[in-house]
Amino acid sequence: MKRRAFLIATAALPLACSVKPKAVAPHPYGYFNPGEARVMDAWLQCLLPGSPGARECNALAYLDKQLQLPHFANVARAVRRTIARLQEAAKPSMFADLAAAEQNDLLTRLQSGQLTDAKINTQKTFELVHGFALEAFMSSPKTFAWLGNSPACPH
């Protein structure tokens, strides 16, 4: 191959190589995997609907950070098992994809002890998640400084 033919043939290579792949956003949670985060987000929205509600007050991030603390290790395991129990009860759909009435029905069954798990007390876990959600909702935005960003909760 002659030099000229080589240069013509490879002229487009720098352009193709300079196209950068789209950056994948890092997973924002330290405890929840993406599927668990979707279920927990829907659960928290049922507990604190409206505006401001769970999303505006960053309740999911608050709960995620709390469950990473060593003294909440048992609670974290119970929450994870309860999320799995909710998913199991919601099949064949995802809990997060159910209509609000269906989500509320499953959460009412969970709260009343009708959705049980042999290894954990799902009623107690419901109460703990509800408590964390209220903490996130009622906390001063200054409380969230350790989250790395301030939630937009306007209370």
Image: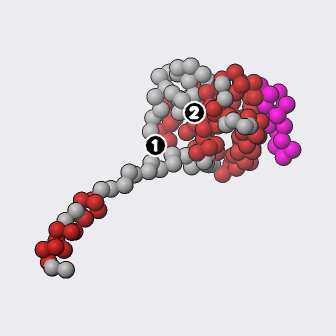
Would you call the spot at circle 1 few (<14 residues within 10 Å), some (14-19), or many (20 or more)?
few
Please give left or right for residue 142 compared with residue 50 in the image.
left
Q: Quadrant of residue 130?
A: top right
Q: Earlier in the sequence, mark 1 or mark 2?
A: 2
What percent of the width, then of the height, locates residue 40? 64, 36
The answer to whether 96 is drawn above or below residue 65 in the figure is: above
Residue 93 visible in the snapshot: yes
Element type at mark 1: loop
Which segment did they paint magenta?
Answer: 108-125
Residue 131 appears in view: no
- Measured along the vertical axis of the image, is residue 44 above or below residue 11? above
Q: Which residue, as the protein is rendered here, is positioned at the far top?
A: 50
Q: Which residue is mark 2?
A: 59
Q: Can you tell which mark lies on residue 148?
A: 1
Disc number lying in front (1 or 2)? 2
Q: Amino acid at mark 2?
A: Ala
Quadrant in the picture for the N terminus: bottom left
Name the residue at 57% across, 49% down.
30
Type of amino acid under label 1: Gly
**Residue 3 magenta-drawn?**
no
